[in-house]
Image (cartoon, rainbow, N blue to C red):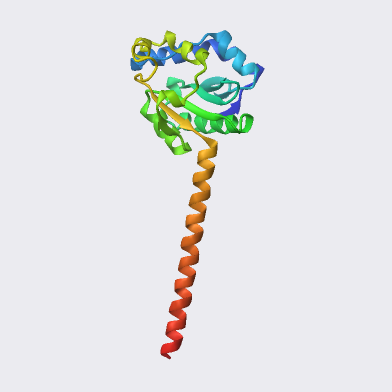
Amino acid sequence: MKVVIADTSHIKYAAEICETIAESASVRGTGIARRTPEYISKKIENGNAVIALDGDKFAGFCYIEKWGHGKFVANSGLIVHPNYRGQGLAKKIKLKVFAHSRDKFPDAKVFSITTGLAVMKMNSDLGYKPVTFSELTDDQTFWDGCQTCKNYDVLSRTNRKMCLCTGMLYDPKKVEKEEKTQVKAKTFKRLKRIKEALFLRKDKNKDK
């Protein structure tokens, strides 16, 4: 099994990818924005997709979408073929496409809207935080893409404030700030332990 950045040699899988996504949504009874083979092919051509293959058999897929002139990106269409589920493949694909997103668009905020608990867990592990829809892209084209989802009426009735999906956001600037704060806290604790050890040693020497 290999998980790689898709290239033009993988366009032949576009129709199967779309069928697998649609069938999965139907089985789970969840809403999902439909994508055409042409749309998926374009993502592959632009180097904005990751595919998992078992030899020459399609096993999984995910692609990157850019919104708001590159201020936001989304990892969308995460799917694993039924024959390869339950093997941790979704997580491998998610890690690969997230790293690829960060490499191609290092300053962009990475967001996700999903109803899947497994995807929420993976997002959380990567540093995503739950947010309101108002904190996501205001690019109308993105929200127009939700029109093919069966839950679109919920999004419309609430003036795009909420839906059955949960919005999650990875903000590189905030994550970097949190990491620096954590490093400072760890450094402070380490220095504190060293000082405490030195004081204890001095006290022991005085008692001798």
Q: Position of residue 121 (x, y in %)?
A: 40, 34
**Residue drawn where x is 43% and y is 29% of the image:** 168
Q: Nearer the viewer, residue 148 or 85?
A: 148
Residue 1 visible in the snapshot: no
Q: Is residue 207 left or right of residue 58?
A: left
Q: Quadrant of residue 105?
A: top right
Q: Position of residue 29 (x, y in %)?
A: 33, 15
Residue that extends furthest to the bottom in the rendered view of this protein: 208
**Residue drawn where x is 44% and y is 38% of the image:** 125
Q: Nearer the viewer, residue 55 or 169?
A: 169
Q: Nearer the viewer, residue 16 or 75?
A: 75
Q: Nearer the viewer, residue 41 or 158?
A: 158
Q: Is residue 69 left or right of residue 94?
A: right
Q: Quadrant of residue 4?
A: top right
Residue 94 visible in the snapshot: yes
**Residue drawn where x is 50% and y is 30% of the image:** 94
Q: Position of residue 28 (x, y in %)?
A: 34, 17
Q: Is residue 29 left or right of residue 206?
A: left
**Residue drawn where x is 54% and y is 31% of the image:** 98
Report the quarter where the C terminus lies: bottom left
Report the quarter where the N terminus lies: top right
Q: Position of residue 176 (x, y in %)?
A: 54, 43
Depicted 88 relative to depicted 201: above or below: above
Q: How many marks?
A: 0
